[in-house]
Image (tube, rainbow, N blue to C red):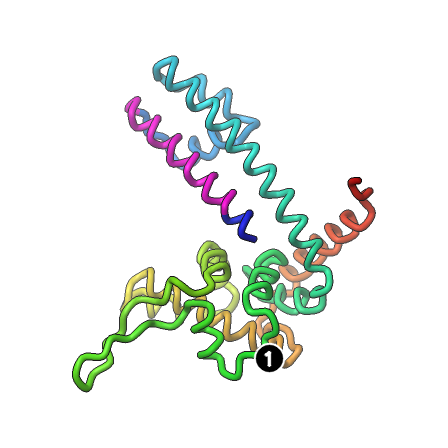
Amino acid sequence: FAQYQLLTCQATQLKNNLQAILCDNGVTLSAEKKKRLLDERYASETLGRLQMSVASRLSIEIALSILWKVAEQKKKLRDAIIAAGAPFEDSVKILITIRGITAFLALAFLADIGDVQRFKTLRKMNAYLGLVQKAKQSGDKNLPRGINRQSRKLTRTLLTQSVPHITAASPELRRYYAELRARRGVGRARIAVIRKICGVMRRMLLEGTEFRDKDPANFERKLKEYEALMRRIQTEPKSA
């Protein structure tokens, strides 16, 4: 997972570099055109239509080639992580009943917390995951501050990217996120949703139960993908 996060950071740096080159050449792309530029199938065609210097064009071609290689390695590493998580298959199948939680995200959560039973309370688990606000005492008052970013952050980082999908998991989560975002802003609402869904996952693991608002079609699709990947990994020849 640490290596996966490193590759993710490298991919982000490359995308930022691409954006900087485009800006230097006065090029502004729509979201759709930017998506096509990053897609190996359409990049050459899209790049050919842009007006920029030869040096800038070459720099973009090099950055894109590295970015695609990083994406390839991320996929390879993701598959390896899922294969290594085979002993936790039962727990993974429980957690992916939540919309927005993939097998990869489920294993990230399991890797972070280890044995869920070692946390006597939800607050202790959330504090371990860096999802509880720090407090500064001033006189008789406890003033809330930001979350503790020195704690375990794998789950928090990966789930942040899936908040839009997670909030679609149930009407309750949608209302909770919308109301909190209106009152406290996007950042705090996002952390609150992650904190809430982590509590739900903890309870599901402790009780061995599926998500109450499971979407059967969504779950079946993820389950088939997970099982197909596990079968493919098990039948692939091992490298020497």
Give the quadrant of residue 173. bottom left
In the image shown, does 85 or 68 lie closer to the viewer?
A: 85
In the image shown, does 42 or 83 lie closer to the viewer?
A: 83
Q: Is residue 23 above or below residue 185?
A: above
Name which residue lies at 46% across and 27% down: 63
Name which residue lies at 55% across and 47% down: 3
Residue type, label 1: Gln
Q: Main secondary structure of the magenta part?
A: helix
Magenta stretch: give its range.
6-26
Give the image location of residue 124, x and y in percent. Answer: 46, 78
* Residue, disc 1: 117
Circle 1 Cα neighbour tier, 10 Å, few/some/many (<14 / 14–19 / ≥20) = few
The image shows a total of numbered marks equal to 1
Give the quadrant of residue 187. bottom left
In the image shown, does 175 or 142 lie closer to the viewer?
A: 142
Q: If the image is split into quadrants, where does the C terminus sit?
A: top right
- Which residue extends farthest bottom? 140
In the image shown, does 119 or 19 lie closer to the viewer?
A: 119
Name which residue lies at 53% across and 52% down: 2
Give the image location of residue 37, x and y in percent. Answer: 47, 29
Q: Is residue 50 magenta?
A: no
Q: Is residue 18 magenta?
A: yes
Residue 172 in view: no
Name which residue lies at 73% across and 50% down: 229
Residue 160 in view: yes
Element marked by disc 1: helix
Give the image location of residue 150, x and y in percent. Answer: 39, 63
